[in-house]
Amino acid sequence: MKTLLILSTLVVLTACSGGRDRLSSGSTAGATGPISRACLAADRSAASTSLCGCVQRVANAELSSTDRSRVARFFADPEFAHSIRISDTTANDNFWRRYQAFVRSARNQCG
């Protein structure tokens, strides 16, 4: 239940619902990066090192470093996510599609 809550929080924080470098960190625990740190710093009750590490591992595999930085910012600035979501630029539309695919993968792998 906790994992579902934190993964759902990723979507809620976006105020709505790829160029990829494939990396594999193996274990879900210990995967660190901007998303994992933001997930833990957001101080949500469902956040755990294991869950946030898993989400980071999925991000490492599916998102570029630039995309990972943007997603990490969603935790602290939901309005930023909303502005990207409603933007009409091709670049933001493409990012949003990559982000939605990432959220689906994180739900499947970490939930």
Image (cartoon, grey):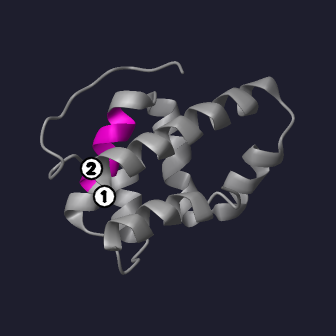
User: The residue tagged with tag 1: helix, strand or loop?
Assistant: helix
Q: Position of residue 49 (x, y in %)?
A: 22, 63
- Residue at screen point 48% across, 43% down: 104
Residue 27 versus residue 110 in the image, above or below: above
Query: Residues in magenta?
Result: 53-60
- Density class for disc 1 (Cα within 10 Å; few <14, some 14-19, many ≥20) is many
Which SS type dominates the magenta stretch?
helix
Left or right, 19 with respect to 107, comes to right
Q: Position of residue 33 (x, y in %)?
A: 31, 46
Mark 2 residue type: Cys
The residue that mark 1 highlights is 52
Mark 1 residue type: Cys
Q: Position of residue 35 (x, y in %)?
A: 40, 51
Which quarter of the image is occupied by the N terminus?
Answer: bottom left
Residues marked 1 and 2 touching at CB (< 8 Å): yes
Residue 102 versus residue 8 in the image, above or below: above
The label number, if any, that marks residue 54 in the structure image:
2
- Residue at screen point 70% across, 57% down: 16
